């Protein structure tokens, strides 16, 4: 099993990749681009998917290293999973509703910050 620090690094790498993918699509949309004119759409989608996987792998790996027998019994894990699902759906929203890119440009990093604060302060634990 990997160390807690390795899982944390994997988790942070996933977060960085996720925000990079969102920023790329949002900036493309804000500059007037659309789904058809985005030549790197597959690369962004792959980055988004890999990022979501790394976030999940790192998060549950850290919980396992903390000795948590049942991660779903930990109360602060539920809001983090909800945020993870929202981040998973956000790429679809960016692609289907490009006019929301300006709003999501600010909201998605704030959502990531909220997830970080939940992990830091562990409410309900």
Image: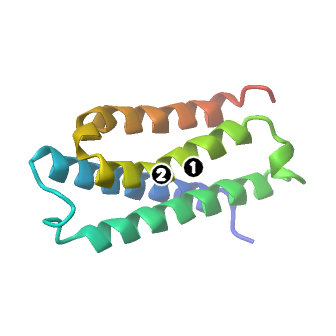
**Among the 4 quarters of the image, the one containing residue 95:** bottom left
Mark 2: secondary structure: helix
Position in image of residue 30 (x %, y %): 15, 44
Could you give the CA–CA distance between mark 2 and mark 1, rounded to whole angstroms? 6 Å
Q: Nearer the viewer, residue 83 or 58?
A: 83
> Could you tell me which residue is drawn at 9 percent across and 49 percent down?
32
| C-beta proximity under 8 Å, tags 2 and 1 | yes
> Taking 78 as reference, is 29 left or right?
left
Residue labelled with disc 1? 85
> Does residue 112 appear left or right of residue 6 in this picture?
left
Please tell me whether mark 1 sits on a helix, a strand or a loop: helix
Which residue is more in the foreground, 78 or 121? Answer: 78
Tell me where residue 73 sits by quadrant: top right
As drawn, the label of residue 89 is 2
Residue drawn where x is 29% and y is 32% of the image: 103
Residue 7, image x and y in percent? Answer: 62, 60
Indicate the quadrant containing the C terminus: top left, top right, bottom left or bottom right: top right
What residue occupies the far left of the structure in this picture? Answer: 32
- Image quadrant in which you'd find residue 82: top right
Please name the residue shown 33% across and 37% down the image: 104
Q: Few, some or many C-alpha atoms within 10 Å of disc 2 (few <14, some 14-19, many ≥20)?
A: few
Identify the image quadrant of the N terminus: bottom right
Residue at image location 54% in from the left, 63% down from the top: 54
Q: Which disc is residue 112 wearing?
A: none
């Amino acid at each position: 099993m990997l160390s807690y620090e390795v899982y944390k690094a994997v988790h942070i790498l996933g977060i960085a990749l996720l925000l990079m993918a969102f920023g790329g699509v949002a900036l493309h949309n804000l500059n007037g681009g659309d789904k058809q004119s985005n030549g790197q759409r597959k690369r962004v989608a792959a980055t988004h998917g890999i990022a979501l996987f790394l976030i999940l792998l790192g998060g549950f790996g850290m919980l396992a290293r903390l000795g948590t027998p049942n991660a779903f019994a930990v109360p602060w894990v539920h809001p983090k999973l909800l945020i993870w699902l929202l981040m998973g759906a956000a790429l679809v929203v960016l692609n289907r509703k490009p006019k929301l890119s300006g709003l999501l440009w600010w909201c998605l990093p704030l959502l990531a910050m909220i997830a970080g604060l939940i992990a830091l302060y562990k409410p309900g634990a």
